[in-house]
Image (spheres, coloured by chain):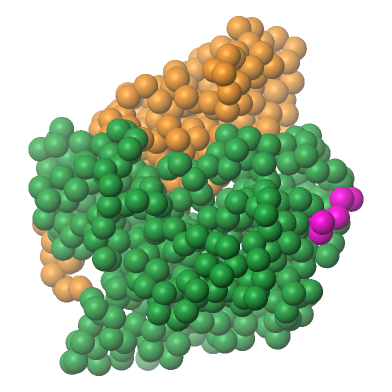
Chain colours: A orange, B green
Amino acid sequence: MAYDKFTTLTSSAVPLPIENVDTDQIIPARFLKATKREAFGENLFRDWRYNSDDSPKQDFVLNNPIYSGKILVGGNNFGSGSSREHAAWAIYDYGFRCVVSSFFADIFKNNAINMGILPVQVSPEFLIQIFSAIELDPHTKIEVSLPNQAIVIQSTGASESFEINGYKKNNLINGFDDIDYLQAMKSEISAFATARAV
Amino acid sequence: MSQMPSTLFDKVWDAHVVRKIEDGPDVFFIDRHFIHEVTSPVAFLGLENRGLKVMYPEHTFATADHNTPTINQHLPVGDPLSANQLMALEQNSAKYGISHWGLGNPKNGIVHVVGPENGITLPGMTIVCGDSHTSTHGAFGAIAFGIGTSEVEMVLSSQCIMQPKPLKMRINVNGSLGKAVTPKDVTLYIISKLTTAGATGYFVEYAGDVFEKMSMEGRMTVCNMSIEMGARGGMIAPDETTFSYINGRELAPKGAAWDKALAYWKTLSTDAGAIFDKEYNFDAADIEPMITYGTNPGMGMGISQSIPKGIDLKGGTATYEKSLAYMGFQEKDQMIGKKVDFVFIGSCTNGRIEDFRAFASIIKGRKKAEHVTAWIVPGSHIVEAQIKEEGILDILTDAGFLLRQPGCSACLAMNDDKVPAGKYAVSTSNRNFEGRQGPGSRTMLASPLVAAAAAVTGYVTDPRELM
């Protein structure tokens, strides 16, 4: 599934300053029963967002109209636990295109990129600066430039660079995906498989 | 010619790199691919949308496990959404020529239990599945890890995924394990020391005499939990224990193929002097039966200890306090004596025969505590048959327990095996996240021995007192 291209995103951000946000919180297992990739955003952070009677929990950030935007800012070790790509689908379907944290779990990071969501890893100090800027002004804009590999807090001008490998960067900027790449090298794979013969 | 000393991980990884992409991932060849009903349907949909075929259907194996009932499996599945996923797996497998072990098939069970017990999982292989506990298969000296659904589609269509090579970590545990200290306690101890993100970015090799002396079932429990400290996977060098476990299993190599495979497997160990990016050493004598008190698997402690103060730990105290508040526990609380409502033994972590033997060793001659609901769920039909053959079923029945049918069950509570809000479960599974075993459920992870002690007393109990 080729995804949207990602170049530069400028948006207000939704703060979630909780550490170790695991994929069971992002999308609980009981919502993984679909056979199509549709409407997962409704259940994003389901049990933090809704009471058991489906009424919204007023103190959860997604239910606070002050906060909105295409960037989700999470605490350290975001996306740990299950490999469910549904977590990335839910974040995408809700409308986020970028997740910022000081540390990501491996599988989640892969799944996010494969979905066209940019995971931006910043230093713990810069993460605190982002949370503070949003606290001061919930409408503050964050600019994420993939070509420049830079993230800027517009209200303070503070910026930091982030890492991404050249292959994935090129994929995201151009909307290419791994499956196309692999299809283009099928004969090389087939020769490799024959030589291994397992 | 002298070569640089190499690690077990390097030997297996490097043998599977089809192409190295400059400033990018490796194109990584996959020997064995397991699929289940939850993370595969969208991958098959992707194939259809692109008009692609499955490149090597004989290297993919399907089993239904995540979303299956654990009673009355002969009846139609009640939940229409679950039934739909199970049907999709069956139809997709049939359409593309993939072996499918659905509900009722004598080989059916949890993917990470049936792979090894049927001889599909072998040393030196690369193994993936859309499930993070695929790390289990590393117990055989394989590189095995969980992948997302996009990657499932990649493996189906090209037998490869794109992976940057992880860093290497070795965790050595030496010495003798104490009374009632099981492989589950070893892994919960390691995770409590490294934290839930302590091995992120690394692939782990477990080494030392504790693992050398461990059974294959125990090694699978340890490798299974590698992901809970963030590692993509964990592995243990294959040895005589590994070879004798595999020998004779249905899909394992036979005759001349066995001899050839065995000769290769014997080369799979880390050379003396090989360098790891990080190395930890632990003393087996420091480990006691473990239990978790919080909402991630790194929040574990020796069962006789008291809950640590957040200020003494790494990480933010706000998150720590949120976690304890969810559990209804306080800093400095003793875990022993806490009331237990549910006990779950099973899952890809502790759903193998050795786990049920351990459980039975404590409940034999005792009775289930009246207020405890217990779910006893074998990892596969083969495990279920062993439970019956060895007389464990009689011990369970005499003590007032019911043996259920195989599946992932209450580990992730996708089926009806859900712990109600606010209730406490001692669980032999792998995750104690908020709501993992049902919305509002409170999970304490532990070994089968600690689970058995809780099941017969109704409270968190040191199993050493019952042995």
Q: Can residue A18 be spotted in the picture? A: yes
In the rendered image, residue B46, in percent from the top left (x then y), is placed at 21, 36
Task: Give the residue displayed 59% in from the left and 14% down from the top.
Answer: A56
Horizontal arrangement in the rendering, residue B372 relative to residue B204 (left or right): right
In the rendered image, residue B159, in percent from the top left (x then y), is placed at 22, 56
Horizontal arrangement in the rendering, residue B62 relative to residue B195 (left or right): left
Q: Quadrant of residue B378?
A: bottom left
Q: How many marks?
A: 0
Residue sitting nearer the eye, B177 or B388:
B388
Q: Would you say residue A92 sits in the magenta stretch? A: no
Horizontal arrangement in the rendering, residue B245 relative to residue B441 (left or right): left
Task: Give the residue displayed 65% in from the left and 76% down from the top.
Answer: B365
Magenta: main secondary structure equals loop
Q: Which portion, as a residue range, is magenta?
A: B332-337
Task: Give the residue displayed 58% in from the left and 63% down from the top.
Answer: B400
Q: Compared with residue A196, is residue B39 higher up or lower down, i.e. above or below? A: above
Q: Would you say residue B335 sits in the magenta stretch? A: yes
Q: Can residue B149 be spotted in the picture? A: no
In the rendered image, residue B142, in percent from the top left (x then y), is placed at 39, 71
In the rendered image, residue B463, in percent from the top left (x then y), is placed at 73, 71
Q: Compared with residue B361, is residue A6 higher up or lower down, i.e. above or below? A: above
Task: Give the residue displayed 83% in from the left and 65% down from the top.
Answer: B304
Residue sitting nearer the eye, A163 or A181:
A181
Residue sitting nearer the eye, B100 or B14:
B100
Which quadrant does the C terminus of chain B fall into?
bottom right
Horizontal arrangement in the rendering, residue B131 relative to residue B102 (left or right): right
Q: Compared with residue B404, is residue A88 higher up or lower down, i.e. above or below? A: above
